[in-house]
Image (spheres, grey):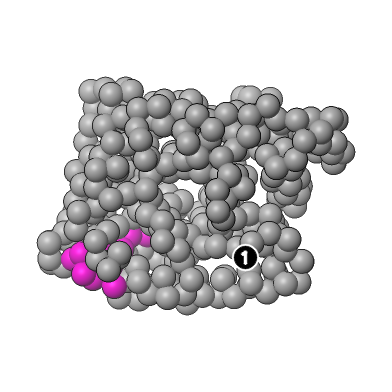
Amino acid sequence: MTFLWYIPNQVAPGHRGDDTVQGHNSIERLTELAQLTEDHGWSGALLGTGWGRPDTFTVATALAARTTTFQPLAAIRPGYWHPAHFASSASTLDELSGGRLLINIVSGQDNLAAYGDSEGDQPQRYARTKEFLQLVRRLWTEEDVTFAGEYFSVTGSTVATRPVVREGRLHPRLYFGGASDAAQRVAATDADVQLFWGEPLDGIAERISHLRYLEKELGREHAPLEFGLRITTLVRDTADEAWADAEAKVAKMAEAQGNRDRRWFKAVGQQRLLDLAERGEVLDDNLYTAPGKYGGGGAGTTWLVGSPDEVAKSLNKYRDLGITHFILSDTPYREETIRIGDQLLPLLRQ
């Protein structure tokens, strides 16, 4: 079981309702958040990526240097990185940090033209991602690599620094997301962990079953695919307090943004989350879908709401389906790193 938090690296303050304004993106603030994860039971934290944010890998390096056990899950994009450059940078950071680096491969939309990339159709994007993953793995584990693909190539390439190797680990674990058929086929053969967003239990069970089928059909060569859940957890001492705060947050989001149509998102996974609100505002026991009406798509669209015992019970149902990696978050980030770490994680580790 791996429990990770989320640390925002944003130019503008107020991400998802965070209350820190002064120095919100300073090295002092980000270090404080990373050190709080160490102090309150977390293995590390996800650092998001996208053009217009501070560079994720630079932030991950800075935080790794100022912590001792913190594992940065650094999100990166094929196209922003050439695989050989990335393999070298990542293995250097992994070696310097004592094998603490985790990687989240992102193939979704971005301002690609701003850094010289171009947008292909969905099959093309995921075909390129597949090549990226295959080549990076080879560069981390082999010497004198020659690779001639449709999108990337190297000749006689050897990465000078090597990732830390220990039992069950040849290199940094590769997390990956995506709900489209093309994305799932890449995950089934070339990722280490498939990340899901906060769908109901039946949806997650269906996707796990399909990915297990694809592993066999496509001939996976690596250790079996693992599964992770990225979701907001709004935890309070009692269920009544939690729901009152959740509804107040949504009311504030509605006031700020209005009930606009959010369905301009193209990603299949985002559409799946946005469609949940049509099934009901609360699904399963306490999966709150209303934020999706106002807060956009992505990881913050659905929330698990309740007391520590109730949210732990819900997360354990995902664990029963095969989820072993959890990336949780809520805002304000500082306070919730502590609250959820102290109140929820001990229940999940029992």
Q: Position of residue 54 (x, y in %)?
A: 45, 26
* Residue drawn at point x = 48 percent, y = 71 percent: 322
* Residue drawn at point x = 23 percent, y = 54 percent: 340
| Residue 120 shows in the view | no
> Between residues 268 and 182, which one lies in front from this camera angle?
182
- Above or below — where is 74 with respect to 155? below
Q: Is residue 255 magenta?
A: no
Q: Position of residue 77 (x, y in %)?
A: 61, 38
Q: Tell me the residue that label 1 is attached to.
A: 224
* Residue drawn at point x = 27 percent, y = 28 percent: 29
Tag 1 secondary structure: loop
**Disc 1 residue crowd, few under 14, some 14–19, many 20+, Cα 10 Å:** some
In the image: residue 278, left or right of residue 152:
left
Q: Which residues are magenta?
A: 302-313
Q: Quadrant location of residue 158?
A: top right
Quadrant where the image shows the N terminus: bottom left
Quadrant where the image shows the C terminus: bottom left
How many marks the image carries: the answer is 1
Q: Position of residue 289 (x, y in %)?
A: 36, 63
Q: Position of residue 216 (x, y in %)?
A: 72, 72
* Residue drawn at point x = 84 percent, y = 30 percent: 156
| Residue 214 shows in the view | yes
